[in-house]
Image: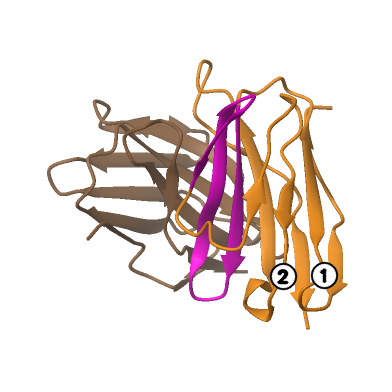
Amino acid sequence: SQKIEQNSEALNIQEGKTATLTCNYTNYSPAYLQWYRQDPGRGPVFLLLIRENEKEKRKERLKVTFDTTLKQSLFHITASQPADSATYLCALDQGSNYKLTFGKGTLLTVNP
Amino acid sequence: EAQVTQNPRYLITVTGKKLTVTCSQNMNHEYMSWYRQDPGLGLRQIYYSMNVEVTDKGDVPEGYKVSRKEKRNFPLILESPSPNQTSLYFCASSNPGTGYEQYFGPGTRLTVT
């Protein structure tokens, strides 16, 4: 069966360090993978999209990698700040470009 | 301001009393979708619409209906709500022609007693 796993429910790091979040999937052949940020009680906010033919994407302090052989995406936040504390969701398409399936998310806490 | 709006934001109702949650977007997006979010289960897609009059089931459509008569609106209808539909609901829109990122509404917290 198809599965998306974000292999840490919660991650605690110190301010200034790099946070690395993982998204693994099985039985999917996604054309692209997305990362979202969600604050408590609010809707997810889009951060980055990476396509199957891209290895890496960057946006300011954020970096995403996509390895279709390992079926894994890594999401990095460098020089992390307490304001980065939130739940981060990965999502991938199911091939139709109209359906996204989300992982359950990783709650990141950046301690000052 | 580009946004997705949902109403109501909070709703407490009783089993069996029909209700509608409205969703509207002002970005001229073709694609709209409804999700529910439950602790431990994450975001799950209920229904989606590729354009006006074109809708399809997501992963958890049972107990829900949708319609897409106008491009900007995508209401979610619960004909006979039950307690297991107590959840946080999100509407989202996107325009696959210009990018696949989804814009989410603020959420509707529904409690069915």
Q: Which residue position holds label 1?
A: B17
Q: Say which label, 1 or 2, has the lower sequence index.
A: 1
Q: Quick one: SS at disc 1? A: loop
Judge whether residue B41 is colored magenta: yes
Give amino acid for label 2: Pro
The reply to the same-chain question for discs 1 and 2 is yes
Q: Residues within 10 Å of mark 1 (few under 14, many from 20)?
A: few
Q: Colour of chain B?
A: orange
Q: Nearer the viewer, residue B9 or B98?
A: B9
Residue A2, given in percent of the width and then of the height, sits at 26, 57
Q: How is the image coloured?
A: by chain
Name the main secondary structure of what is drawn in magenta.
Answer: strand
Q: Residue at x 84, y 74 (%)?
A: B13
Q: Which residue position holds label 2?
A: B81
Q: Nearer the viewer, residue B62 or B22?
A: B62
Q: Is residue B24 above or below residue A6?
A: above
Q: Is residue B6 above or below residue A19?
A: above
Residue A10, given in percent of the width and then of the height, sits at 46, 73
Q: Give the magenta-colored segment's residue range.
A: B31-57
Report if the CB atoms under discs 1 and 2 are less than 8 Å apart. Answer: yes
Residue A68, given in percent of the width and then of the height, sits at 18, 40
Q: Quick one: SS at disc 2? A: loop
User: Quadrant location of the N terminus of chain B?
Assistant: top right
Give the CA separation, mark 1 to mark 2. Answer: 6 Å
Q: Nearer the viewer, residue B37 or A74?
A: B37
Q: Colour of chain A?
A: brown
Callout count: 2
- Residue A107 in view of the camera: yes
